[in-house]
Every structure is written in structure tokens, then in C-alpha cells.
Image (cartoon, helix red, strand yellow):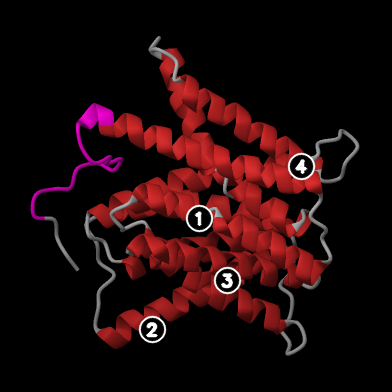
Amino acid sequence: MRSFWMLAASLFFSLMAAFAKFGTDAFGAYELVFYRQLFATLVLYGFVVARGRTLRTPYLGSHFKRSILGTAALLIWFYAIAHLPLGTAMTLNYTNPLWMAAIAVVLALRRHDPLEWKLLLCVVLGFFGITLVLNPDVHSADFLPGLIGLSSGFLAALAQFQVRQMTELHEPEWRIVFYFSLTGTVASLVCHFLFEGPMTMLTLENGWPVLGMAVSGILAQLSMTRAWSGESILLTSSLQYAAIVFAAVFGWMFFDEPISLWAALGILIITVAGVGATLETRRKMRKSTGGEPHPAVPCRANPKKS
């Protein structure tokens, strides 16, 4: 049942993106990431102190890899939110199953293994859907931000793989999110001063999007981390596509962003391709292992529990 936490995570991520888009009128993209991550870091540190928990972990290297990948994906995603329609930015962020399928095809070609035609079809179909959503045009202002936004899905896929590995090692959700939030706080502050200039003063007038973004962001991270610790990876992967629908609806409701027929068709194609890539990947893993698919590294014997 933990897989169904992905529905909550999808809703909260969409709300976070909507609040962030409201905030782009007064704040830079990196500045918004800073406030979002700082809030999560302080809240989780307060939780650790209040509950007498510890931040010590034997898996610091895994936390570092997850945090760097996740922070890079988040920074790029917020850039896309600031420069693209909300539904488009969310769609590009959720292309991670397509990236994983593309990697599998490339590795098969390099090893001269038989080509996985079903995965290749999912990749081609998914990227066709992306072109419908982006409506690429060499003269379009959205084309370059769209290409940049595509990389957020690739980095998010790698980050989610690290999350899955750590939950298999019984790392608690709050510790995974804490180190990710701490890394993001430092990285986004550095990027803001390098590329955006001095900090913007928080006021009652401009502070509400920041607060809404921060609260929904930490709820989304905790929900997502719990979802990836569920038994059904396939169900978890499929449910995350609900975020694309939520974001498209929020974009239409709050930002007057029309959902064109081509964009709606593209979102549908990307969703079908992503679910299909996940189904085929899990089927191959189950066939090769003779049991339940298990993409993470094997757990150590008697792993340390928190």
C-alpha cells in the first residue's frame, strides 16, 4: 500500500510547482529552490532534535550521490517552471522511465546484445509525445528551455534509483530527505549569487508563494520517498504520472495556460510510453531473475536499522 503514497506525492509536487510559478514574478528560480530546501532542512532538523534521532549514517556516500543528482534535477526543473507552461515543465520532469529505457537500448547496442524492440518503441513513442507537447520551433522561445528541461527527467531517474537503494538498506525517509534538502540549500544559494544576484526581501505580499511551495515541497518529498519503499515498483512508477494531469489542470486554472489538443495528445502518448517502458523493463527483470523484479543492489546481511 505504500505505493499509493505516490498519488499524494504527485499532488504535492504539482502544488509546489504551481506555488513556484506564482513566485517567479518576485524571485529567481534558484532563489526559490533555496527557500524550499532551507525550509525542509530546518523542519527535519527540528524533528531529529525533538524525537532524539540521529543523522549519523553508514551510507553517507549513497546520500551524497542521491543529493547531488536530485539537486541538479530540481534546479533544472525550477528553471523549466519559470520559462515554460506548468504542464509542459511537469511533463518533461516525468520522462525518467523513457530515459531509463533509452539507456537500456544503448547498453544493448554496445554489448551487441539483441535489441529490445519493445523498449525502443516506447522510447520513440515517448519522444514523439515530447515533440507534441513542446511543439518545437527554431523560432520558439520555449524550445531551448524545453531542451534544458528534458535533462531534469534523466537526472531524476538516477536520483530515484538511489532512493530505492537506500530504502532497501532501511534508511528512514526523513534522513534521506534531510541530506537532499541540506545539499540543495547550499547548492541553490551558490547558484543564486552566481547567476541571479542579491537575495530578494521576503514580505507578506510576496512570501505566500514561498511558504506554500516550501510546505507542499517537503510533503511531496516525504510522500515520494515512502512510496518508493513500497513493494510494487511498477505501481509506484505508474502512479507518478498523475502529476502531469494535476499540473496541466493547475496551469489551466491559475495561469490561463490552455491545454491544446496536440499537447493533450502528447501528454497521453508520454504517459502510455512511460508505463509501457516500465512494464517491459519489469517483465524482462522478472524473466531473468525468475521472480519479483528487484532493481536495487542486494541488501547487506542484517543491515543497520534506524
Q: Answer above or below: position of 292 versus 38.
A: above
- Mark 4 or 2: in front is 4
Going from the N terminus, do you reach mark 1 or mark 4 first? 4
Going from the N terminus, do you reach mark 3 or mark 1 first? 3
Going from the N terminus, do you reach mark 1 or mark 2 first? 2
Q: Which mark is residue 274?
A: none
Q: Which residue is mark 1?
A: 240
The secondary structure type at the circle numbered 1 is loop
Q: Nearer the viewer, residue 185 or 43?
A: 43
Q: Quadrant of the N terminus?
A: bottom left
Q: What residue is at 34 percent from the left and 33 percent from the top?
A: 283
Q: Quadrant of residue 249?
A: bottom right
Q: Answer above or below: position of 204 versus 132.
A: below
Side of 146 where 120 appears, left or right? left
Q: Amino acid at mark 4?
A: Leu
Q: Which mark is residue 46?
A: 2
Would you call the spot at circle 1 few (<14 residues within 10 Å), some (14-19), or many (20 or more)? many
How many angstroms separate mark 1 from mark 2 (CA)? 29 Å
Are the two marked residues, 3 and 2, in contact with CB atoms closer than 8 angstroms?
Answer: no
Q: Residue furthest left?
A: 302
Side of 181 where 124 appears, left or right? right
Are the two marked residues, 1 and 2, in contact with CB atoms closer than 8 angstroms?
Answer: no
Q: Amino acid at mark 2?
A: Gly
The secondary structure type at the circle numbered 4 is helix
Q: Which residues are magenta?
A: 287-302
Q: Nearer the viewer, residue 123 or 61?
A: 123
Q: Answer above or below: position of 48 versus 273.
A: below
Q: What residue is at 25 percent from the left and 27 percent from the top?
A: 288
Q: Which residue is mark 3?
A: 36
- Residue 46 in percent (x, y) is at 38, 83
- Mark 3 or 4: in front is 4
Are the two marked residues, 3 and 1, in contact with CB atoms closer than 8 angstroms?
Answer: no
